[in-house]
Image: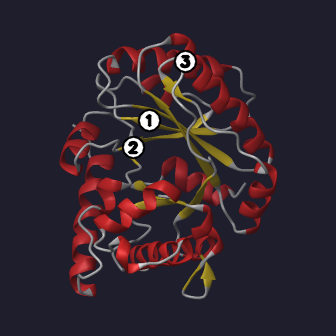
């Protein structure tokens, strides 16, 4: 583990950019960016176009380590290059800590939750991540209803795989998303905090994790997790909130920083001039940085 990067992730001012749309979510991300499905004829062409979009974002003068602590990449983004360097190296050289999305999507709903599909060949992927200077990983589950058995299954699966990732020398971001439209959102979050705390208490001193959580209904619900000695940082997903709403809610939660995806890239368009693109991206970054750093 890179100690300088660990310090940056733990103490750095700013937020983590989520640039890890994959597979099923790629056409929508491209469509929102102004690239329609009739503009590509194959999956290869689609992934090249989305890499072009990500390249434009990370190479923008607005995308700096002053405001951005880290960035989460999709596997194909890790394997591709930006300005002649592998994306992880490019970001690291820019002072931005690279993470890799490792999950393979969600299983069907059971007990009110979607656990992760199996992740075959995870050890080989983690080995490649180390070769590409990746600091940590991210994996997402989905909680839709208040069901203790379901929530327990999500948390157990996340921590079991997290230990495999830690053993490979990487820091896992555990992401048990709570659906923002759930009728039981506050109740789910209270129980989720307890379930996560139990797993954290069973870690050894050197087993470090990060958490990526939906912005809680009750402000500072996750304060005890933020302060737990095994937690490097707790970050929040936008989860379908508009950027304005996500920022306003984030400001109410001390110590919680953003790791937004849609809310980061929503106003960017392929047809914008470089000047316009950089201005829109810069304004967006400034607003998310402010919500992550300046509370109350």
For the point 42% across and 62% down, which residue is it?
68
Residue 150: image tag = 3
Q: Is residue 24 above or below residue 209?
A: below
Place of residue 263 in the rendered image (x, y in percent of width and height, measured from the top left)? 30, 54
Q: Quadrant of residue 276?
A: bottom left
Residue 69: image tag = none
Q: Residues within 10 Å of mark 1 (few under 14, many from 20)?
A: many
For the point 56% across and 27% down, which residue is it?
228
Label 1 sits on a secondary structure element that is strand
Asked if residue 126 lies left or right of residue 220, the reply is: right
Label 3 sits on a secondary structure element that is helix
Asked if residue 88 lies left or right of residue 46, the reply is: right
Quarter in which the C terminus is drawn: top left
Q: Is residue 170 above or below residue 214?
A: below
In the picture of the structure, the residue carrying the numbered disc 1 is 213
Tell me which numbered mark, 2 or 1, is placed earlier along the sequence: 1
Place of residue 83 in the rendered image (x, y in percent of width and height, measured from the top left)? 54, 87
From the viewer's side, name the closer residue of 243 and 147: 147
**Mark 3 vs mark 1: in front:** 3
Q: CA distance from mark 2 to mark 1?
A: 6 Å
For the point 24% across and 37% down, which residue is it?
249
Q: Residues within 10 Å of mark 3 (few under 14, many from 20)?
A: many
Asked if marks 2 and 1 touch (Cβ < 8 Å), the reply is yes
In the picture of the structure, the residue carrying the numbered disc 2 is 237
Asked if residue 206 lies left or right of residue 215, the reply is: right
């Amino acid at each position: 583990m890179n100690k300088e990067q660990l310090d940056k992730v733990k103490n750095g001012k700013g937020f983590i950019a989520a640039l890890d749309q994959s597979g099923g979510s790629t056409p929508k991300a491209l469509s929102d960016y102004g690239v329609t499905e009739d503009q590509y004829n194959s999956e290869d062409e689609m992934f090249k176009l989305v890499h072009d979009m990500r390249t434009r974002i990370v190479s923008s003068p607005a995308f700096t380590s002053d405001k951005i602590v880290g960035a989460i990449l999709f596997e194909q983004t890790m394997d591709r290059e930006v300005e002649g360097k592998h994306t992880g190296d490019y970001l690291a050289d820019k002072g931005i800590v690279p993470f890799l999305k490792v999950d393979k999507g969600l299983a069907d709903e059971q007990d009110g939750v979607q656990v992760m599909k199996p992740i075959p060949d995870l050890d080989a992927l983690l080995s490649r991540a180390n070769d590409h200077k990746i600091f940590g990983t991210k994996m997402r589950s989905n909680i839709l209803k208040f069901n203790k058995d379901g929530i327990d299954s999500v948390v157990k699966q996340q921590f079991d795989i997290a230990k495999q990732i830690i053993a490979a020398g990487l820091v896992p971001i555990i992401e048990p998303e709570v659906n923002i439209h759930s009728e039981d959102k506050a109740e789910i979050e209270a129980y989720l905090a307890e379930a996560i705390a139990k797993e954290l208490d069973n870690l050894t001193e050197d087993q470090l994790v990060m958490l990526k959580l939906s912005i809680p209904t009750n402000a500072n619900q996750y304060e005890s997790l933020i302060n737990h000695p095994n937690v490097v940082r707790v970050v929040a997903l936008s989860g379908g909130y508009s950027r304005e709403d996500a920022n306003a809610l984030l400001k109410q939660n001390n110590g919680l920083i953003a790791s937004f995806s849609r809310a980061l890239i929503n106003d960017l368009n392929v047809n914008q001039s470089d000047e316009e693109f950089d201005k829109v991206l810069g304004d967006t970054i400034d607003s998310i940085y402010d919500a992550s750093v300046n509370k109350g």
